[in-house]
Image: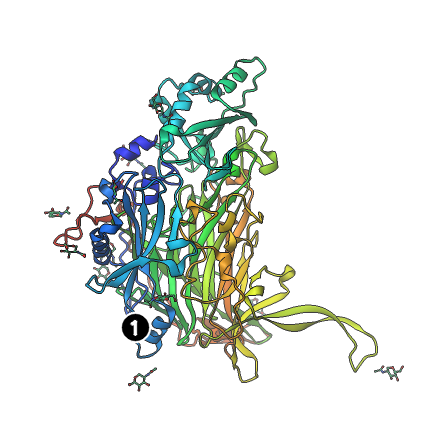
C-alpha cells in the first residue's frame, strides 16, 4: 500500500517509526516517511575472512552510545518528574517525549589529555533531545545528561553552552497535524480535483489512495492585520505512482516527487487547535484564489484553463529500459582482493589502521558517519572530520518549491544509512561495520552502515619514462563509505585515504529529484516532461575539519599565485610575470571565504612554529577536488532559512575551536529557522586565529538545474563534489616512494627489456574462483531494532515484531 496518510501513521505503532520528528511532529509521507521502504538491510559477506585485527592503544571515546547506555539514560530521564515524559509508544501530540539520545562528545582538552598523555578516560555524557508537547507552545530542548553509567552522580541540565537560544529551546509550530484541513478542503472541491487532476475522487479514501499532500519546509511565518505572528504552510498535491508491471512482478517505483500536480493549498496553522486551522488560498496554474468558492466559480467559467496533469508512466521506473548495448550484458570488470584485507580493524573500538594512517569511526543519528583522531605517520593531522548539515534550497514560481529549503539533519542521515549492496555500493570484499543510533526510544542498528575497502583507483599515482626505463606506482586507496537515502535523494559519502598522505571527502547524489509542476515555471528550471519542471535548487553540504597539524596551534595561510610586473637587475625592461605572495588569516573577522577565481590561492593550514629544515612551515593544503559546480548557496538572505543558513553562504570558513561550538547547525534548526538552536554566524566574534586551535568548515555542493538526464534518477557521475587535503611541505619528499606496488622496467635502445624491479611486492597468481567471491542477493535483509521503554534489562535485545 503506497498511500500514506496521517491516519495510517497514527494507526501504526509509535515503535515502528525510527525518526521521531517525522512520527510525532510533521509531514507524514514526506522524505521517506517510515513507510516508504521496507528497512532492507545487510549482506552476508564474510567479513571475518582474513580480516587482520588490531587493538587501539586508546579506547574510542567518541563511540556512539551502546544500547544499554541509551536504555539507562532513557530510564533515568523518565524518572525525572519535572520532565513529565511519556513513553513514545503511549504518547500523542500533547505529551513530552524523548526524540533522540546521542553521545555528547568529550571536550577536546579532556580528550587530548587522555589520548596524548596520562589523562583519565573522559566521562561519557549524553545529549538528549526532548520534545515538549504538553504545552500551548510546544518546543524541543536539548539536554545534557551524565556522567554515565547512571548513578547518584548523574545530573541533567539544558545544553545551554552549545546552543544560541534561551535554555536550549526551540519552538515547534506544527506539533499538530493539519491533515484534516487538507482533507476537508479537498472534499469541498472533489469534483474540481477529479476534473483537473484526472482522478476519481469521491471519498477521502480515494483522495488518500491517489495523492500525497505535503509541502513547504521550513514553515512560513507572517504577521496578520494586527501584527500577530501567523504560522503558514503551503501544501501541494503529489500523485502516488501506481504499481507497474516490470520484469515478472508488480512494483511501486518511488517516484512520487516526479509527480507534482500543480494544485496547492495555503493554510493558517497557528496554534494548537487544528479545528481552528483555516484555508487561506488555493493556487492552480499560477492563479491564486482566496477560497474554495472563488476557485469553484473560476472553474465553472468556460475560459478556465486546465493544465496537463502530470501522470506516471514507465518513465518513473528505474529498471533497465531501452535497447541493450553491444556486449553490455557480459560480466563487466570487477575488483578482487587476492592478498586479503590489507588493513587492520579494532571492531570494538571502530578503529582502523591502513598503511600510515590510523583513525576512529563513529556514527550519529543526525549526521551519520564521523571520523576522529586521524593520524598520519604517527602524528595527528585531524581531530574531527564529518558532515554538519546538508541544505537543499529550491526556488520556483509555486509556493511549495519557493518555500522549500530542506535542512536534512532534521530528518537525519543516521536513520537512513541503510546497508550497502555488496558488489554494487562496495566491492564484495569490503569490511562492513554496523552502526547504531537511538531515536524515539528505539535503538536501531544498520548492518553495514559503513563499508571500508581498498581499491585500485585505475590511474597511477606516479609514473615516468625515459630512454632507459619506465617507472610506475599503483594508486591504491582506502575508502570509508556510508550511503543515506534521505527521502527522495541518495547521498553517498566517501572519505578516501591515499598513499601520498592525502584525504579526500566526497559526496555524490543520486535518487529522485523533487520536481515542480511545469506551469509558468520556465524561469526556475527546464521543462523535462509534459507536466514537469526540473525545479532548480542549490545543494550545500557542510563539513567540519578540525585540523591539528603538529599540535593544536595552527594558522590558515594563503600562498597566492599572483600576477606582477618586475624589473630585474639583469634586464632593464619590465617583465610581466607572476610571484608567490604569503598571507595569513589572523582573525575570525576574515573567517568567511570563497575559493579564489582560477585557483590563485593555495589555502594551507600550517603550524608556523614547526618549520621544516628549509624554514618553510609544515602544513596541509586543502582544495576542491571534484565537482566545482557550486560551493555555497546562491541565495544570500534566504526568506526560508533566515538565521539558519550561516554555514552555507560561503564556500569555507575558519573559526577558533570551542567546546561550545561543536556543530555548524542543529538538527532542530528547521523547527524555527529565525531563532535557530545553533546560529553559525555567532561563531564569528573576532577571535584571534593566529597559532590557535582552528577549525575549518567547508561546503560541497552543486547548483542543480535538473535536465532530462535526471529522469528517472540523478546520476552520481556529475552530481558530486569533493575536497582534498594533502601534505604541503609537511614531509621532505613524496611518501608514495615507500610503496612496493610499483615497477621499474629497464630497456635498451633496441627496445628489449633488460631488468625488472618489483621491490618485494607480491604478485597474485593462480586461479580466481569467482564462485568463491560472489554474493547471494537474497541474503540482503532487515534492520535490527531494540525497544527501549519500557526496558527489560533481562532481555535487552528483544527484537520488535517488525520495523515498518
Ligand atoms: C569466513 O572466513 C573465515 C576465514 O577465511 C572462515 O574460517 C569462515 O568459515 C568463513 N565463514 C563463512 C560463513 O564462510
Ligand atoms: C528510577 O527510579 C526508581 C524508583 O525510585 C529507581 O528504583 C530506579 O533505580 C531509577 N532508575 C534510574 C535509571 O534512575
Ligand atoms: C504532564 O504531561 C501530561 C501529558 O502527558 C499533561 O496532561 C500534564 O498537564 C503535564 N503535567 C504538567 C505538570 O505539566
Ligand atoms: C565542556 O565544555 C563546556 C563549554 O566550555 C563546559 O560547559 C562543560 O562543562 C564541559 N564539559 C565537561 C564534561 O567538562
Ligand atoms: C605520564 O606519567 C609518567 C609517570 O608518571 C610520566 O613519566 C610521563 O611523563 C607522563 N607523560 C605525560 C605525557 O604526561
Ligand atoms: C473537518 O471536517 C470535520 C467533519 O466536518 C470536522 O469535524 C473538522 O473539525 C474539520 N477539520 C478542520 C481542520 O476543518
Ligand atoms: C486520465 O486517466 C485515465 C485513466 O487513468 C488515462 O487513461 C488517461 O490517459 C488520463 N488522461 C490524461 C490526459 O492523462
Ligand atoms: C519471476 O517469477 C518466478 C516464478 O514465479 C520467480 O521464481 C522469480 O523469483 C521471479 N523473479 C525474477 C526476478 O525472476
Ligand atoms: C552486525 O549486525 C549483525 C546483525 O545483528 C550481526 O549478526 C553481526 O555480528 C554484526 N557484526 C559485527 C561486526 O558486530
Ligand atoms: C640598463 O640601462 C643602462 C642605462 O641605459 C645601461 O647602462 C645598462 O647597461 C643596461 N643594463 C642592462 C642589463 O641592459
Ligand atoms: C624491437 O626492435 C626490433 C629491432 O628494432 C624489432 O625487430 C622488433 O620488432 C621490436 N620489438 C617490438 C616488440 O617492438
Ligand atoms: C523479551 O523477551 C523475553 C523472552 O522472550 C520476554 O519474556 C520478555 O517479556 C520480553 N520483553 C520485552 C520488553 O518485550
Ligand atoms: Cu539536486
Q: Quadrant of the C terminus?
A: top left
In the figure, is residue 24 to the left or right of 282?
left
Within 10 Å of the Cα at label 1, are there few (<14), some (14-19), or many (20+) other Cα atoms? few
Q: Residue at x 42, y 59 (%)?
A: 663
Q: Position of residue 268 (x, y in %)?
A: 45, 32
Name above or below for residue 85 compared with residue 582. above
Is 756 or 565 nearer to us in this picture?
Answer: 565
Is 32 or 556 nearer to us in this picture?
Answer: 556
In the figure, is residue 449 to the left or right of 628?
left
Name above or below for residue 359 compared with residue 731. above
Is residue 515 at least partly visible in the picture? Answer: no
Question: Residue 376 is drawn in which quadrant?
Answer: bottom left
Which residue was labeled with disc 1? 58
Q: Position of residue 514 (x, y in %)?
A: 48, 38
Name above or below for residue 701 compared with residue 319. below
Name above or below for residue 792 compared with residue 802. below
Is 554 or 568 nearer to us in this picture?
Answer: 554
Amino acid at each position: 500500500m503506497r498511500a500514506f496518510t496521517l491516519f495510517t501513521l497514527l494507526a501504526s505503532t509509535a515503535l515502528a517509526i525510527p525518526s521521531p520528528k517525522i512520527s510525532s511532529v510533521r509531514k507524514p509521507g514526506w522524505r521517506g516517511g517510515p513507510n516508504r521502504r521496507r528497512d532492507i538491510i545487510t549482506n552476508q559477506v564474510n567479513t571475518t575472512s582474513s580480516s587482520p585485527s588490531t587493538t587501539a592503544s586508546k579506547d574510542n571515546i567518541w563511540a556512539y552510545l551502546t544500547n544499554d547506555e541509551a536504555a539507562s539514560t532513557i530510564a533515568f530521564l523518565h524518572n525525572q518528574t519535572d520532565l513529565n515524559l511519556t513513553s513514545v509508544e503511549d504518547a500523542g501530540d500533547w505529551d513530552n517525549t524523548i526524540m533522540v539520545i546521542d553521545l555528547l562528545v568529550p571536550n577536546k582538552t579532556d580528550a587530548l589529555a587522555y589520548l596524548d598523555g596520562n589523562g583519565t578516560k573522559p566521562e561519557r555524557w549524553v545529549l538528549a533531545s526532548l520534545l515538549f508537547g504538553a504545552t500551548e507552545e510546544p518546543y524541543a530542548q536539548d539536554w545534557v545528561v551524565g556522567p554515565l553509567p547512571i548513578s547518584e552522580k548523574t545530573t541533567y541540565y539544558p545544553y545551554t553552552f552549545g546552543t544560541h537560544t534561551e535554555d536550549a529551546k526551540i519552538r515547534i509550530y506544527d506539533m499538530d497535524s493539519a491533515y484534516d484541513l487538507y482533507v476537508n478542503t479537498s472534499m469541498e472541491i472533489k469534483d474540481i480535483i477529479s476534473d483537473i487532476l484526472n482522478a476519481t475522487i469521491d471519498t477521502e479514501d480515494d483522495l488518500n489512495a491517489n495523492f500525497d499532500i505535503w509541502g513547504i519546509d521550513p514553515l512560513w511565518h507572517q504577521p496578520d492585520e494586527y501584527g500577530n505572528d501567523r504560522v503558514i504552510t503551503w501544501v501541494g498535491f503529489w500523485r502516488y505512482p501506481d504499481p507497474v508491471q516490470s520484469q515478472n512482478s508488480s512494483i511501486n517505483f518511488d517516484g512520487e516527487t516526479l509527480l507534482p500536480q500543480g494544485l496547492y493549498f495555503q493554510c493558517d496553522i497557528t496554534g494548537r487547535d487544528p479545528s481552528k486551522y483555516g484555508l487561506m488560498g488555493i493556487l492552480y496554474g499560477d492563479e491564486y484564489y482566496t477560497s474554495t468558492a472563488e476557485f469553484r466559480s473560476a472553474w465553472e467559467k468556460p475560459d478556465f484553463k486546465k493544465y496537463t496533469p502530470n501522470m506516471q508512466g514507465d518513465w518513473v521506473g528505474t529498471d533497465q529500459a531501452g535497447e541493450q548495448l553491444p556486449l553490455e550484458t557480459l560480466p563487466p570488470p570487477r575488483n578482487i582482493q587476492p592478498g586479503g584485507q590489507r588493513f587492520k580493524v579494532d571492531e570494538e573500538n571502530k578503529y582502523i589502521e591502513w598503511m600510515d594512517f590510523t583513525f576512529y569511526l563513529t556514527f550519529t543519528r543526525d549526521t551519520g558517519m564521523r571520523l576522529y583522531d586521524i593520524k598520519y605517520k604517527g602524528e595527528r593531522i585531524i581531530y574531527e572530520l564529518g558532515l554538519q548539515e546538508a541544505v537543499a534550497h529550491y526556488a520556483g514560481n509555486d509556493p511549495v518549491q519557493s518555500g522549500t529549503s530542506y535542512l536534512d539533519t532534521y530528518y537525519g542521515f543516521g536513520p537512513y544509512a541503510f546497508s550497502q549492496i555488496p558488489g554494487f555500493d562496495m566491492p564484495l570484499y569490503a569490511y562492513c561495520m554496523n552502526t547504531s543510533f537511538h531515536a524515539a526510544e528505539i535503538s536501531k542498528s544498520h548492518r553495514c552502515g559503513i563499508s571500508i575497502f581498498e581499491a585500485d583507483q585505475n590511474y597511477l599515482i606516479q609514473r615516468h619514462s625515459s630512454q632507459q626505463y619506465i617507472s610506475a606506482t599503483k594508486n591504491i586507496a582506502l575508502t570509508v563509505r556510508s550511503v543515506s537515502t534521505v527521502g527522495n535523494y541518495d547521498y553517498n559519502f566517501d572519505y578516501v585515504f591515499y598513499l601520498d598522505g592525502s584525504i579526500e571527502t566526497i559526496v555524490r547524489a543520486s535518487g529522485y529529484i523533487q520536481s515542480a509542476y511545469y506551469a509558468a515555471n520556465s524561469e526556475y528550471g527546464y521543462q523535462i516532461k509534459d507536466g514537469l519542471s526540473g525545479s532548480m535548487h542549490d545543494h550545500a553540504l557542510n563539513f567540519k575539519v578540525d585540523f591539528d597539524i603538529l599540535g593544536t596551534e595552527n594558522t590558515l595561510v594563503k600562498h597566492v599565485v599572483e600576477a606582477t610586473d618586475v624589473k630585474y637587475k639583469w634586464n632593464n625592461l619590465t617583465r610581466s610575470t607572476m610571484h608567490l605572495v604569503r598571507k595569513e588569516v589572523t582573525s575570525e573577522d576574515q573567517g568567511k571565504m570563497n575559493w579564489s577565481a582560477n585557483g590563485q590561492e593555495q589555502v594551507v593550514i600550517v603550524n608556523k612554529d614547526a618549520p621544516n629544515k628549509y624554514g618553510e612551515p609544515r602544513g596541509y593544503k586543502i582544495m576542491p577536488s571534484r565537482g566545482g559546480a557550486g560551493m555555497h548557496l546562491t541565495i544570500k538572505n534566504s526568506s526560508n532559512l533566515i538565521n539558519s543558513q550561516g554555514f552555507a553562504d560561503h564556500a569555507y570558513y575558519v573559526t577558533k575551536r570551542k567546546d561550545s561550538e561543536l556543530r555548524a547547525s542543529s538538527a532542530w534548526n528547521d523547527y524555527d529557522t529565525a531563532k535557530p538552536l545553533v546560529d553559525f554566524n555567532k561563531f564569528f566574534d573576532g577571535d584571534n586565529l593566529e597559532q590557535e586551535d582552528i577549525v575549518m568548515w567547508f561546503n560541497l555542493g552543486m547548483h542543480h538545474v535538473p535536465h532530462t538526464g535526471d529522469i528517472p534518477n540523478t546520476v552520481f557521475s556529475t552530481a558530486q563534489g569533493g575536497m582534498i587535503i594533502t601534505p604541503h611541505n609537511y614531509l621532505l619528499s613524496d611518501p608514495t616512494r615507500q610503496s612496493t606496488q610499483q615497477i621499474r622496467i629497464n630497456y635498451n635502445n633496441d627496445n628489449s627489456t633488460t631488468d625488472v624491479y618489483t621491490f618485494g611486492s607480491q604478485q597474485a597468481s593462480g586461479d580466481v574462483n569467482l564462485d568463491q567471491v560472489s554474493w547471494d542477493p537474497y541474503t540482503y535483509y532487515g534492520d535490527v531494532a531494540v525497544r527501549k521503554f519500557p526496558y527489560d534489562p533481562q532481555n535487552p535485545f528483544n527484537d520488535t515484531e517488525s520495523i515498518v
